[in-house]
Image (cartoon, rainbow, N blue to C red):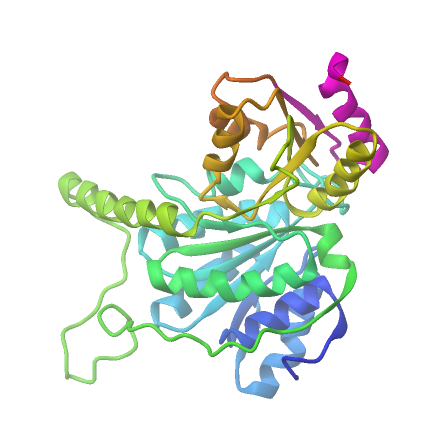
Amino acid sequence: MSSTQKMLMKGNEALAEAAIQAGCHHFFGYPITPQTEVAAYMAKKMPKIGGTYMQAESEIAAINMVYGAASAGVRAMTSSSSPGISLKSEGISYLAGSDLPCLIVNVQRGSPGLGGIQPSQADYWQATRAPGHGDLHVLVFAPSSIQEMVDMVFDAFDLADCYRMPAMILADGMLGQMMEPISFPEKQVKTYDKSGWTTNGHQHKRAHHIVNSLYLQPEELEDKILERFQRYEEVKAKHTRCEEYLMEDAEYVVVAYGATSRIVRSSVNSAREKGIKVGLIRPLTLWPYPYAPIEKAAERGAKAFLSVEMSMGQMVDDVRIAVNGRAPVSFFGRTGGVIPTPAEVLSEIEKMAGGDR
């Protein structure tokens, strides 16, 4: 498939092709709407390139297969949707606790429970706060277009390998099911030296490598966690990402990510036409979270902030942390698979602007 050619692709299929081009030839998953096309695409393509496609007996089995493949040093991934990610959470903790790189894709759906199959952003807390038990983080990328989803797959694999940690693409049913013209980046697949830890056969030429997350001596476990958190601090310093839109003179700030940010951008443009000086801060990484641009906006005197999400309000917690009481922070969201409209968001911006208009 040509890298420079623009082509119309469904989000889930574009993501799968991007993973293959990024050097992932090992996929383990289980069907669930609205991400099933990722697995279906992999089922067609992997045999043709000599890769591995395995439909596991469950989400739990799939994430443990990722653990095994990652331990051997290959790029491996799984994909699922909200309740399926919950089932994988134990395995995600084991991956993080064993310092194993991999890619996990969550094409979010309405929840909690089985919920529904329409788009949602209600897994934000899970992805950024508790993807599994224990002291851990995973890299979390938040694309707002299919092209961004493609580009972020390459970055996710590279950073996962570089820092030996799991990475997640936090998409949603809208991005997974929609179609857009995209192109694949002409990138050389980066390789990282994994010879010091992979369990791919010693051939009596080196000591055994053991991939493990069990440490029975508390001091040993603490040292391991502290070393891991030093790497996390480096990730925060070097790889926190966001986009700012019309923020140069913004008196009011809307914060939104993913598919919701597309709607918010339209509403911001409409508000500008009405004379409201409003801007948009769009996090591209949810962990690490871009607190600094929000803090900067608050420090220079932004009058109010609004978090817009497809949930009952989760990212708004991080907005409040960044603002730190320097200005009011409000929230607007739709949940259960309902997508907010540009008119609804514009109305909330007008409320935020209040009597200053």
Q: Residue at x 73, y 20 (%)?
A: 353
Residue 104 percent location from the top left of the image: 52, 57
Residue 69 percent location from the top left of the image: 41, 70
Say if residue 64 shows up in the picture: yes
Q: Quadrant of the N terminus?
A: bottom right
Residue 74 percent location from the top left of the image: 40, 73
Residue 60 percent location from the top left of the image: 51, 54
Q: Seen in the image, is 129 located left or right of residue 53? A: left
Q: In the displayed structure, would residue 199 be above or below residue 110?
A: below
Q: Quadrant of the C terminus?
A: top right
Q: Quadrant of residue 38?
A: bottom right
Q: Seen in the image, is 297 located left or right of residue 102? A: right
Q: Residue at x 57, y 33 (%)?
A: 315
Q: In the displayed structure, would residue 340 be above or below residue 285?
A: above
Q: Seen in the image, is 80 located left or right of residue 26? A: right
Say if residue 112 shows up in the picture: no
In the picture as drawn, the residue positioned furthest to the top comes out as 355
Q: Seen in the image, is 338 located left or right of residue 13? A: right
Q: Residue at x 63, y 59 (%)?
A: 148
Q: Which residue occupies the foreground of this view, 67 or 295?
A: 295
Q: Quadrant of residue 30?
A: bottom right
Total labels: the figure holds 0
Q: Residue at x 58, y 59 (%)?
A: 79
Q: Any magenta on residue 222?
A: no
Q: Which residue occupies the foreground of this view, 251 or 66?
A: 251
Range of magenta residues: 329-356
Q: In the displayed structure, would residue 28 be above or below residue 98?
A: below
Q: Any magenta on residue 331?
A: yes
In the picture as drawn, the residue positioned furthest to the right comes out as 343
